Image (spheres, rainbow, N blue to C red):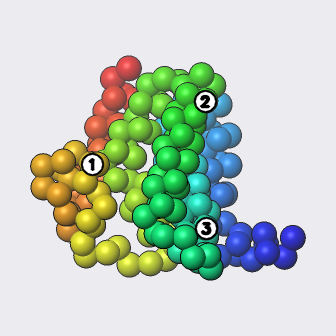
Amino acid sequence: MTEFINILKYRLLWLNMLLSMLFTFISFYFSGAAAILFVLLSNLFDILGYHFSLIRRSNQLPDKIIIHSYRINQFMYDMLLLIIIGIQFDWIASLAGWIMKLFGLQDVFYYLFLKEKLPLKWNWMKWTPLGWFKGDLTKNEIVIQSFVGTSIAVIILFLR
């Protein structure tokens, strides 16, 4: 139990969990809030899964195998979460949440909640819209892309 409490005290993980609970409650009254709920829950999975399982691990499996396995688990979690949010709250909110993640907002949240500086180079963001065209992205490009994605998601939520 003390290990679990130590994890909850780690950096701003508690804030991510608190905001997740808050946005879950808000989503029952305003379904559009479920979009940010998706990003927060996906971020929580990333912090607990990637940060604690991969970065702080002690086993000797090759990184490539572990990271590919984790990415499969992360993708399946995100798809299940999108479906649950779509069924429980709203399919448009689910789509808006996916757009925000696609544009990199969850990755920005990852660093903010871990109280770490945003990296200057983002070479793993090739799956984002700008990453498809450019490849490696800079910190400013990620922040701008996240802002654009969030703006698109908000516009979609208001236009429905």
**Residue 146: percent from left, percent from top:** 30, 53
* In this view, 109 is above or below 33: below
Q: Please, what secondary structure does the residue beneath circle 2 have? A: helix
In the figure, is residue 148 to the left or right of 24? left
Query: Which residue is under mark 3?
Result: 53
* In this view, 119 is above or below 88: below
**Residue 105: percent from left, percent from top:** 38, 53
Residue at x 58% of width, y 55% of height:
45
Q: Residues within 10 Å of mark 1 (few under 14, many from 20)?
A: many
Disc 2/disc 1 C-alpha distance (Å): 23 Å
Mark toward the viewer: 1 or 3: 3
Q: Please, what secondary structure does the residue beneath circle 1 have? A: loop
70 and 80: which one is in front? 70
**Residue 57: percent from left, percent from top:** 61, 75
In the figure, is residue 132 to the left or right of 106? left
Residue 128: numbered disc: 1
Residue that extends furthest to the front in the rendered view of this protein: 61
* In this view, 85 is above or below 104: above
Question: Can residue 140 be seen at all in this image of the molecule?
Answer: no
Residue at x 51% of width, y 35% of height:
79
Q: Please, what secondary structure does the residue beneath circle 3 have? A: helix
Question: Can residue 110 be seen at all in this image of the molecule?
Answer: yes
Mark 2 is on which residue type?
Ile
Mark before the other along the chain sequence, 2 or 3 = 3
